[in-house]
């Protein structure tokens, strides 16, 4: 069952890469594949069992899959490494602002929409 | 055994075609154990395993290209598993429909703020860091560059390293920052993870729950689509003004 779902995902990745290569180079193939699958699920109106099983198994290991590309930091040039403290500072500073801001803004807006929705049901 | 034969055994292990896969799995499991045991959210498994792998490769003198080739079976799954994010997105479709406007507004405001801050900081440091200034346009165009396996063939480009660091650091600081600012709504937490720490943040959001993961995937994809379409114009305009 898991294998069947995985087969679908691999095929979608191939199609996504093709579309990215030929038509839409700004988006990576996997994001196009994601959009295709999302569209398909909307049309079909449900998630089949093999796909559901495969995704719940595979998504657990998402962090593992990032270890290989992340280790590519080894390739960073000496110029970058010399500037690393400055880059890290800059990154942390901007994250200190944007992470709470995005969360706070979404929380306020979401709660307002939810309350309005509840009011409508009563 | 003598020292030279120990060395030979070590070399045989390192030369084994499965060594990169084994190293990655071992490093990740140790990182996961440490993460759960310590309870410190800062010890992100991706970050800890990355440091362990880099340390091990340096210690045994293996270059990244060889490691990457050997670890390809793991890396190849990144694309298909990213596509699998469509399932939590679909499963939370009712919540997403209800919160469509808040999501869109937050992604637009948060996304452009991230871009502006990065550009401003890059520009402020431009004198010392010509390197950073040159990447300012590109690094922000592709918050989803992590996912572009094709582009990751060589992570040599500065932009890619920058994107990767954002994901790792954003995910390490995220839970604490959201806690301090009292953000408890799962959709809000997820969206912030997705906007600020893209795919690595999404992986963390999925740990918090399905709704959180779905909104992280949504934030990441929306920001990716919007910035891929809009940013070349905005960045071109901003940089021409500098």
Image (spheres, rainbow, N blue to C red):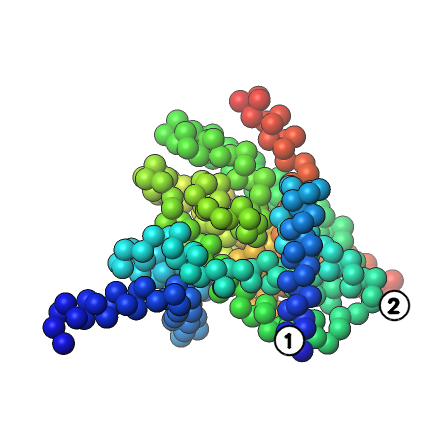
Crowding at dot 2, Cα within 10 Å, few <14 / some 14-19 / many 20+, comes out as few
Circle 1 packing at 10 Å, graded few (<14), some (14-19), many (20+), is some
User: x, y (%) of residue B94?
Assistant: 78, 64
- Label 2: state its secondary structure: loop
Q: Nearer the viewer, mark 2 or mark 1?
A: 1
At x 41%, y 29%, the residue is: B130
Apparent side of residue A98 relative to residue B233 in the rendered image (left or right):
left
Label 1 marks a residue whose chain is A
Nearer the observer, B156 or B187: B156
SS type, badge 1: helix
Q: Is residue A81 above or below residue B61?
A: above
Which image quadrant: the C terminus of chain A?
Answer: bottom right
Which residue shows up at 65% across the image and 56% down it? Answer: A14
Q: Is residue B178 visible?
A: no
Residue occupying the point 39% across, 57% down: B67
Question: As drawn, which residue projects farthest toward the top?
Answer: B241
**Picture quadrant where residue A88 is located:** top left
| Residue that carries the numbered disc 2 in the rendered image | A122
For residue A2, which numbered disc appears in the image? Answer: 1
Q: Which mark is residue B91?
A: none
Q: Quadrant of the N terminus of chain A?
A: bottom right
Image location (x, y in percent) of residue B19: 37, 66
Q: Position of residue B102 (x, y in %)?
A: 72, 51
């Amino acid at each position: 069952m898991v294998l069947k779902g995985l087969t679908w995902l691999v095929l979608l990745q191939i199609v996504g890469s093709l579309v990215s290569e030929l038509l839409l180079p700004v988006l990576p193939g996997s994001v196009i594949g994601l959009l295709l699958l999302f569209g398909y699920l909307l049309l079909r109106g449900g998630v089949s069992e093999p796909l559901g099983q495969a995704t719940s198994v595979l998504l657990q290991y998402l962090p593992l899959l990032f270890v290989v590309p992340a280790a590519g930091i080894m390739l960073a040039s000496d110029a970058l490494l010399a500037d690393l403290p400055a880059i890290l500072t800059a990154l942390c500073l901007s994250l200190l602002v944007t992470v709470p801001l995005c969360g706070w803004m979404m929380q306020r807006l979401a709660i307002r929409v939810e309350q309005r929705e509840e009011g409508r049901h009563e | 055994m003598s020292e030279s034969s120990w060395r030979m055994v070590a070399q045989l292990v390192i030369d084994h075609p499965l060594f990169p896969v084994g190293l990655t799995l071992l490093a990740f499991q140790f990182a996961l154990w440490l993460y759960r045991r310590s309870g410190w959210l800062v010890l992100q498994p991706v970050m800890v395993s990355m440091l362990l792998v880099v340390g091990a490769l340096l210690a045994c003198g293996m270059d990244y290209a060889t490691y990457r080739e050997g670890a390809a079976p793991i890396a190849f799954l990144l694309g298909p598993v990213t596509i699998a994010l469509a399932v939590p997105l679909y499963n939370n479709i009712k919540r997403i429909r209800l919160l469509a406007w808040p999501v869109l507004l937050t992604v637009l405001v948060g996304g452009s703020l991230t871009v502006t801050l990065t550009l401003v900081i890059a520009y402020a440091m431009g004198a010392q860091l010509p390197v950073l200034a040159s990447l300012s346009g590109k690094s922000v165009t592709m918050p989803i560059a992590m996912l572009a396996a094709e582009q990751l063939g060589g992570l040599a480009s500065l932009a890619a390293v920058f994107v990767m660091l954002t994901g790792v650091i954003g995910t390490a600081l995220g839970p604490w920052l959201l806690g301090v600012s009292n953000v408890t709504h799962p959709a809000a937490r997820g969206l912030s993870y997705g906007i600020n720490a893209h795919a690595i943040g999404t992986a963390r959001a999925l740990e918090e729950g399905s709704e959180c993961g779905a909104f992280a995937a949504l934030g990441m994809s929306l920001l990716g689509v919007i910035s891929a379409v809009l940013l070349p114009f905005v960045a071109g305009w901003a940089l021409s003004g500098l």
